[in-house]
Amino acid sequence: MTNIDHLRGGQPLNTARTVNHTKTATTNTPSTTAIEPQHDAVSLSSQGKAVGQIHQQLAAETSFDAAKVAEIKQAIANGSYTIDADKLANNIIKFEDELNDL
């Protein structure tokens, strides 16, 4: 499994954080420190945005054909379901080839 260092091209993660402090003074009171609020920002790469869009599209689609599932269940129950071993083997090989391309 790839760790975060490989994803970042082996460059170390910069964990330093800076805080801006400003001092203000009035004529009657001693100096006080005002801390400006920190603002974190996140930006996604175009690939990250594309993955998010694909995720939203897949979430909106139905994940399976309920009618086909019912038909297969019925065929299994009555003993008429047959498996084409060559077709199954070819689909497994195709799937493995697709995984190797990733």
Image: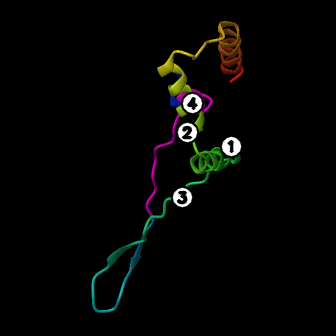
Image position of 99 (left or right of 79): right
Q: Which mark is residue 71?
A: 4
Q: Earlier in the sequence, mark 4 or mark 3?
A: 3
Q: Which mark is residue 95?
A: none
Instruction: Find disc 1 in the rendering and name its residue.
Output: 47
Q: CA distance from mark 4 to mark 3?
A: 51 Å
Q: Amino acid at mark 3?
A: Ala
Q: Amino acid at mark 1?
A: Gln
Instruction: Report the residue at 53% width, 33% height from top.
Output: 70
Seen from the viewer's position, the closer of residues 53 and 43 is: 53
Tag 3's secondary structure? loop
Q: Is residue 96 above or below residue 45?
A: above
Instruction: Report the residue at 58% width, 26% height from top.
Output: 6
Instruction: Find disc 2 in the rendering and name its residue.
Output: 66
Q: Position of residue 81 (x, y in %)?
A: 57, 17
Instruction: Find disc 3 in the rendering and name its residue.
Output: 41
Q: Which numbered mark, 2 or 4, is in the foreground of this view?
A: 4
Q: CA distance from mark 2 to mark 1?
A: 33 Å
Q: Which numbered mark, 1 or 3, is in the foreground of this view?
A: 1
Q: CA distance from mark 2 to mark 3?
A: 43 Å
- Provide the residue span drawn in magenta: 5-19
Q: Earlier in the sequence, mark 2 or mark 4?
A: 2
Q: Is residue 53 above or below residue 99?
A: below
Residue 99 is inside the magenta segment: no
Q: Amino acid at mark 4?
A: Glu
Instruction: Report the residue at 67% width, 19% height from top.
Output: 95
